[in-house]
Image (cartoon, grey):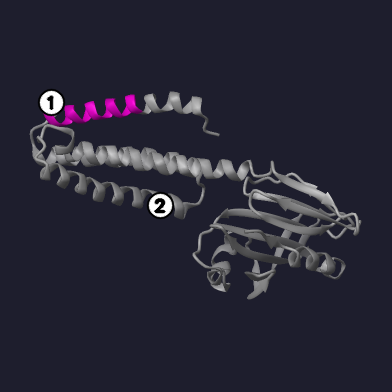
Amino acid sequence: MVTGDSLEVSIPAAAHTLERWLQAADRVDYEYMDNLFIKTLVKLTIIAAVLGVFTFGYALVESRPPKIIAFFIVTLIFSFVAGIIVLLLGRLFRTSRQSFLGNPFKVILTLVIIIGGAKILGAHMANQQVSESTSPVEYSDDETEATTQTYDNTDYGVSFTYPSNWSLRTPQRKSTLLLLYEQTGSQATCNLSVVPQDQDKIEKYNEVYFKTNLPKIHQSVTNLVTQFRTLNSKKVSLTTCDIVIQTESGSVPTQFTILTALHKGQRFMMVLNIPKESLSLVESDMSTMMNSLTFKE
């Protein structure tokens, strides 16, 4: 978590590092080479190298390859476009070519560092929010219905009811808010996860989306069907498919059910893994959990 004390230390350090890089840029301009083509090639190489370092840093906080590629492309484009604008303003106000605003290399390199650093910090803070989101979660017994419990996350405004024969387990991923195991021998599991939404509307979480993404997790995905429904005034995507899970005792045919909802820029997924031979035992539990999923504005 970024604190005020850490910022007091990191900001001067970042400024000092930037100053050293710009001094190196001056040496490229005035000391080492006179050939314009070679000089330009070296400057572009330096910009690409610095952007590569920031991309590696972004990959440490964001594991999805499409996001990492988008970071590289967007940072590069924004830096060059903003650099051109800054240089045009410098020309407009007739700044010296020896000044900062008159040096395209310095301007673009500085923007790469600022934009890249800001995006890394933003991704890091978003991950921190997810990892710390369990602090305001409340689990309460329903006095009028002793067979159920309520999960209520006030940070994300999401809640649902689950049967008391499902027990809590420690999630392995930061994005998982809740992990439940059924305790009567069905081997069924349920988890609720949240990440920033990667599609702009719920209708895009369709069969094409899941046929593209599920095979990255499970090798055998068959009979995939997606439907859309309104659940507690929220339009959701409900996807079911068959998968095969490998265990020590062999292959287990399993029904994979994914309830997807969008809320305040976040994508929520309730995922249920139910061995097919246990479906009849937990159908009522599945209905209780999915139908009680509620979001607060």
Would you say 295 lies left or right of 143 here? left
Q: Which mark is residue 187?
A: none
**Residue positioned most to the front:** 297
Would you say 134 lies left or right of 54 here? right
Rounded to the nearest angstrom, the CA distance separating label 1 from label 2 is 35 Å
Q: Residue 68 appears at what percent x and percent y?
A: 44, 49
Residue 248 visible (yes or no)? no
- Measuring 24% from the left and 29% from the top, which residue is drawn there? 22
Would you say 97 lies left or right of 106 here? left
Q: Residue 276 appears at what percent x and percent y?
A: 79, 68
Q: Nearer the viewer, residue 285 or 294?
A: 294
Q: Which mark is residue 31?
A: 1
Amino acid type assigned to the residue bearing label 1 in the image: Glu
Q: Secondary structure at mark 2?
A: helix
- Measuring 37% from the left and 28% from the top, which residue is drawn there? 14
Lower sequence index among marks 1 and 2: 1
- Measuring 68% from the left and 45% from the top, which residue is drawn there? 172
Would you say 3 lies left or right of 148 here? left
Amino acid type assigned to the residue bearing label 2 in the image: Ile
Q: Nearer the viewer, residue 204 or 63?
A: 204
Q: Nearer the viewer, residue 10 or 174?
A: 10
Q: Which residues are magenta?
A: 15-31
Query: Residue 231 colored magenta?
Result: no
Can you identify the residue that label 2 sits on? 69
Circle count: 2
Question: Considering the image in quadrants, where does the C terminus appear?
Answer: bottom right
Question: Considering the image in quadrants, where does the N terminus appear?
Answer: top right
Residue 101 visible (yes or no)? yes
- Residue 21 vertical position relative to residue 180 in the rendered view, above or below: above
Q: Nearer the viewer, residue 191 or 37?
A: 191
Binning the other alpha carbons within 10 Å of mark 2 as few (below 14), some (14 to 19) or many (20 upward) gives few
